[in-house]
Amino acid sequence: MAEHAAHTDGHAEHKLEIFRGLVKFKTNTQKIWGVLIFLSLVTIVEVALGYIKPDLLNATFLKLKYLNWIFIILTLVKAYYITWDFMHMRDETSGLRRAVVWTAVFLIIYLIAILLVEGEYIYEVYRDAAVSTDF
Amino acid sequence: MDSTVASTGTEEQKWGGGTQPLNVSYGKMMMWFFILSDALTFTGFLAAYGFSRFKFIEEWPLADEVFNHFPFLHGTDAPMFYVALMTFILIGSSVTMVLAVDAGHQMKQKKVAFYMLLTVIGGMIFVGSQAWEWKNFIAGEYGAVTTKGGKVLQFLEVDTGKRVALQDFVEVGTREVAPYGNSQGIWFQSSGQYDATYTFEEVKKGFEANPNITIRTQQLIVNEETGASEKLVLSRADALVKLNKDGVGVVEGANLTQNEYGAPLFADFFFFITGFHGFHVFSGVIFNLLVFFNVLLGTYERRGSYEMVEKVGLYWHFVDLVWVFVFTFFYLV
């Protein structure tokens, strides 16, 4: 299983370390199962938090509850491992990685920032102005 | 510099041609760029969802009240467990997909075929689960009253605070269908509401006859003790006034113009985003099936490369990736 030298698609080897080298797998198959376990754990934590909804996490930071911050951060963590290990982004050249990931990250942050600020503004119009349900 | 020399002297260097700065095949690179553009499409949808939610931040439905069904556990309150299960199914099929890719690297035809088959089955289960989810969402559970301002009023018991379905306290009155008949198309105007079991007047009568029922509005308020967001519950007296003053119609389940859960946009985005994602899963299943048959026929064995498995694999993982975000923003946050 360990010999991946016969790749036909130009990759030399799979990089088998995750968590910045904290965990190193012996084979690619092992890494796949390892990442599955990690993603499952994260999902279980998400569902448990969503079910229990601890009162402790209802305080807000930057208008967002701690609980929602945790959900969003855990989602990004999952997205990272799906992209890096299932989609083999870890093994691609930095050029391809940056062309895809940076473009997406920049445009997504841009779009979300504009739309959420706008949504908040319209909420305030509804709340403070004489208009009720108009648009 | 010898600017007039015909030979540029760059043949051996970076710009001499023949280099592959990204070191991927054309097909894989284009799949990545397609995924990038598709990711931006989904971003547009989810950001629009966020926009609408911020716009109606004080009256958005609580997701764990809406999605609380689980197969074979009828009547049990199981918030999000079913979507969590769907998430595991999709991640699981992602794993079998990546195992197929790995087996492809080792040119093991039978192993690739086996894992591709598992992936296809996982995808089909997921699409089926989504259909079930839609069915529950469209059918609804409790029913509600719509108001003049386009909001809904939901009913609950005064002493327990539990939701009450319309069928538990409303009785269907007489319907005068016979004098008109379907062909005139007006029978529902005079003797009932065409898209609901009950008329508003019947709900009102049932409400007045049951003193243990009160109304919950769409309004979200913050519980002072716990800090959690809750729907505003009216006192019985206020509820009677509210129902008589603002109530206009009855809504059961969900469609594109109104739903019993709250803001109409909530259902619109639910249908649109999960529908678009479900369509991606469906097309992914089709692609995976095609590749599965090609693996069986030995197409890639003859070609000497299983890169096609890798390319559909990228698409399949992307579908999983999108679901991770849909799961968070529709069901958790």
Image (spheres, coloured by chain):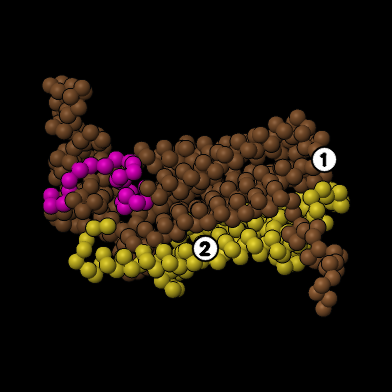
In the image, A97 versus B107, the foreground residue is: A97
Q: Is residue B23 left or right of residue A128?
A: right
**Secondary structure under badge 2?**
helix
Q: Mark 1 and mark 2: span between their CA atoms?
A: 39 Å
Q: Which residue is mark 2?
A: A108
Where is residue A128? Give x, y as percent: 24, 70
Chain bearing mark 2:
A
| Number of the label disc, if any, that sits on residue B219 | none
Q: Is residue B9 above or below residue B180?
A: below
Q: Residue at x 34, y 43 (%)?
A: B256
Q: Which chain is brown?
A: B
Residue B86 painted magenta: no
On screen, residue B218 versus residue B92, left or right, reads: left
Residue A123 quadrant: bottom left
Which chain is drawn using yellow? A
Residue at image location 77% in from the left, 42% down from the top: B306
> Would you call the spot at circle 2 few (<14 residues within 10 Å), some (14-19), or many (20 or more)?
some
Query: What range of the chain is rendered magenta?
Result: B244-267
The residue lying furthest to the bottom in this view is: B1
> Do the residues at discs 1 and 2 belong to one chain?
no
Q: Tag 2: residue type?
A: Ile
Do residues under tags 1 and 2 come within 8 Å of each other at their CB atoms? no
Residue B266 painted magenta: yes
Q: Is residue B96 visible?
A: yes
| Mark 1: amino acid | Gly
* Secondary structure of the residue carrying numbered label 1: loop
Q: Which residue is mark 1?
A: B304
